Image (cartoon, coloured by chain):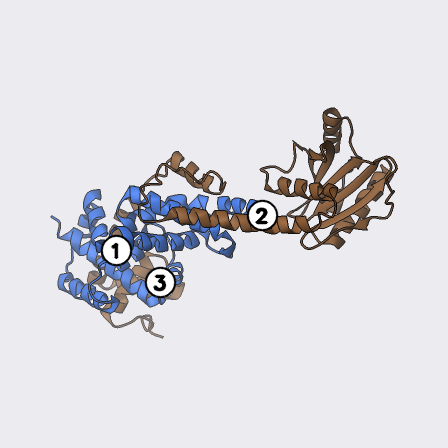
Chain colours: A blue, B brown
Amino acid sequence: MALSGKSSAERFGEVVLPHLADAVAFARWLTGSREDAEDVVQEACLKAYAGIDTYAGGNARAWLLAIVRNVSYTWLAKNRPRALVVVGDLADLDEFAAGRETETADPEGPEAALIAKADTAALEAAIADLPHPFREVLVLRDINGLTYREIAAMLGVPLGTVMSRLSRARGLLMSELGSER
Amino acid sequence: MSEENALPTNGTDLRLLLHALADGELDAATTLSVERRLAGDPALAAEYARILALRTAIGGLPRPDVSDAFRARIAALADGEKATGRPTEHRLGSFDWRAMAASILVTAAVASGATYWATSRIAQSSFVGEIASAQQRSLLAASPVDVASSDRHTVKPWLDARIGMSPPTVDLSKDGYVLLGGRVDVIENRPVPALVYQLRKHLITLIAAPRESGSEPVPVAKDLSTGGFSLIHWTEGAFSYWAISDISASELQEFVTRFRAAAAAG
């Protein structure tokens, strides 16, 4: 018990610090800016340190990213309330995406080569334009490299929801990039 | 068995499987089925190519690099006391991280308060109280020892050179007690040597003070433990010993027995 202070610092070093880059990348996409991401990650790390005893083993990266996600949304609610505006509830959103997807999913679709050549700024803008629930799944999967199951556990949603949001996020990006030029 | 009987007929569900295939989330049997379907369906294959292209494009996005300064700032959070006066303190705005820092400090205060409570209860005499404080300080300090060495032939001369005396320093590593080193504690304004052993994650501090002339010998180790802290006292030769630790009294007694046996043999 008396040693917990020391071992907390040690555990913090082992559990949190190796995943700092992932935490910053995730927060950058949730908050929209690099500077805000550092503030959010610093806050998340304070929480992670205070709650290091609640880390029960398992995927340390997913554990840290879950904290980053909570802190990001709290931060956004306070500092960028408009960024969080979601029209209707999630069911509406899923329908909305489905609508846009079928609308644009012509049999040909954009050329894969066109998507592959998309310039960085256009791709980043397209990701930033995704509604939050889609963007976070896309970033967790394609930038942080979490598995479907890890994402489902973190968000507390069924695996199928993760899969459909990911599919829709990518569908929106593909049609956006395909129509760019 | 039809090779595609496991695949959904619905286009939306089939598309989910394409993404799962690109992400390596399918089992071998389903992977095989989807790959066979792809081979015979150009539209589906084109969609799959788009998914792969998009993944590659996203994977090629520049990732924000974590500056050394930021990394150092985060690493310093674990040091607690440095957690004030950050350059970004004001940028956090309405996000009250000061409250967070304060709550960590409160937690730390509660934790050390518990230790204080435990130590103050055994402070039957000021001498014992000071031993307990020394142990407490050593737990809070960055290093519990002033000379860090598992070699008793290093620790003993170091103590001799510092304060002109040293208790028997024995090697108990084969019993699981690793000698971390030694330090000098000041008890009742007198410097006294202390040895620090580690058992698993726990520290055992062994303080050896020269016996006062005319003091009662305590040949049988006396258990002075109370809530939270184990403390065992005995005398041997010219020294009075106090072993203090957060392990249970019976475990500490085991250490004392082995230490005395080894000291007598050495």
Q: Chain of mark 3?
A: B
Q: Amino acid at mark 2?
A: Ser
Percent coordinates x, y for residue A105 in the rendering: 16, 62
Residue denoted by label 1: B51
For marks 1 and 3, give the one nearer the viewer: 1
Residue in front for this viewpoint, A113 or B177 = B177
Numbered circle sitting on residue B31: 3
Quadrant in which residue B178 is drawn: top right
Residue denoted by label 2: B112
Q: Secondary structure at mark 1?
A: helix
Percent coordinates x, y for residue B150 in the rendering: 70, 35
Task: Please give the name of the residue rendered at 32% of the width and 55% of the height, measured from the top-left corner.
Answer: A74
Badge 1: few (under 14), some or many (20 or more) residues near its Cα, within 10 Å? many
Quadrant in which residue B131 is drawn: top right
Alpha carbon distance from label 1 to label 3? 16 Å
Q: Amino acid at mark 3?
A: Thr
Residue in front for this viewpoint, B228 or A4 = B228
Q: Secondary structure at mark 2?
A: helix
For marks 1 and 2, give the one nearer the viewer: 2
The image shows residue A68, relative to residue A91, as above or below, that is above
Percent coordinates x, y for residue B50 in the rendering: 22, 54
Numbered circle sitting on residue A11: none
Badge 3: few (under 14), some or many (20 or more) residues near its Cα, within 10 Å? some
Q: In this image, A80 relative to B23: left or right?
A: left
**Same chain for the residues under marks 2 and 3 in the image:** yes
**Same chain for the residues under marks 1 and 3 in the image:** yes
For marks 2 and 3, give the one nearer the viewer: 2
Percent coordinates x, y for residue A131 in the rendering: 23, 58
Is residue A123 something one can see in this rendering?
A: yes
Task: Please give the name of the residue rendered at 60% of the width and 52% of the height, measured from the top-left corner.
Answer: B114
Residues tagged 1 and 3 counted as in contact (Cβ below 8 A): no
